[in-house]
Image (tube, rainbow, N blue to C red):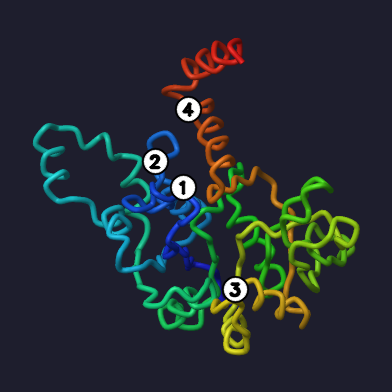
Amino acid sequence: MKKVKKAVILVGGFGTRFLPATLCTPKELFPLVDKPILFYHLKECVDSGITHVCLVSSEEKHSINDLVNPNAKLIQRLKTQNKMALLDSYYSVMNKLKIKIVYQKEQNGTAGALACAQDWLNGDPFVLYYGDDLIEADVPAAKQIIDVYNQTGKSVCILQKVKKEDIHKYGSAVLQKIKGKDYYNMSAIVEKPKTEEAPSLYASIGRYVLTQEIFDELDNLQAINGEYYVTAAINNLAERGRMNATVVCGTYHDCGNKLEFAKTITEYMLKSEEFGQEYRKYIKNLAKKL
């Protein structure tokens, strides 16, 4: 069984929910304190033992390239001014990864984006990330699902238990417990079910280990409003008994939602070693005015 050393991160979408901000800045580069969302994904990759990353982007999103290959004049200025320490956290991650950027020529959904990375993957298993799904955890989320893959050799989905009144917003997993194990067999994901019809309160939250079997499923997908979705292919794998699932130990942040992203900024600011104490005072004073 091959080890998981690669990751694919989908960052090619237009980010229409955040217009007009995304006219100039990709949502994957929106900052949480002083680091872009995408950087947190890359750090998770490093902390999970991943060494190679493919970013599936679009040719219009030049800033993605700037994160991977910083402005040479800026770097030279920092060196001249003896300020390279400002980028210590950046290089501690980037120097441990080999990053490839490929471009999705046509905006035809997440399955179309993933297909762009097939040649680069060269048959290897990989972790799939969506650019705006952030999971904060002591044990990196990618490592949690890689650990399950190492036991089963199957693709793995990560889940979060949600409130009953919220399950209609997610894909609800159909699960079978495996005796003596901390993971499940997953036979289906029911997309946005009615509350009373949800098979479970465990929702898929956008982090997967996938084997090359996924590409056989991509070839058989039907378009929905002109787009093809990875989740449909994952559901097909589940129906064939080729999918496990595990419940995340950590906190999920939906950074593709305006309100949830604002909450995430607040949480990260409160936990900041540099700003957390002063920010907490600010929040307390602000709350008195509400």
How many numbered callouts?
4
Q: Earlier in the sequence, mark 1 or mark 4?
A: 1
Residue at (11% x, 39% y) in the render? 77
Residue receiving disc 2: 35
**Label 4 element class:** loop
Residue receiving disc 4: 272
Image coords of residue 143 (percent x, y)? 59, 56
Mark 3 touches mark 4? (CB < 8 Å): no
Q: Earlier in the sequence, mark 1 or mark 2?
A: 2
Looking at the image, residue 168 sits to the left or right of residue 18; the answer is: right
Q: Earlier in the sequence, mark 4 or mark 2?
A: 2
Looking at the image, residue 252 sits to the left or right of residue 3; the answer is: right
For disc 2, the neighbor class at 10 Å (few under 14, some 14 to 19, many from 20) is few
Return the residue nearer the eye: 147 or 253: 253
- For marks 2 and 3, give the one nearer the viewer: 3
Return the residue nearer the eye: 138 or 115: 115
Q: Is residue 156 above or below residue 167?
A: below
Residue at (58% x, 83% y) in the render? 218
**Label 2 element class:** strand
Residue at (31% x, 51% y) in the render? 24
Q: Earlier in the sequence, mark 2 or mark 3?
A: 2
Residue receiving disc 1: 40
Q: Earlier in the sequence, mark 1 or mark 3?
A: 1
Query: Residue 230: which numbered mark, if any?
Result: 3
Q: Amino acid at mark 1?
A: Tyr
Rounded to the nearest whole Å, what is the CA distance between mark 3 and mark 4?
A: 35 Å
**Label 3 element class:** helix
Q: Residue furthest left?
A: 80
Image coords of residue 127 (percent x, y)? 55, 66
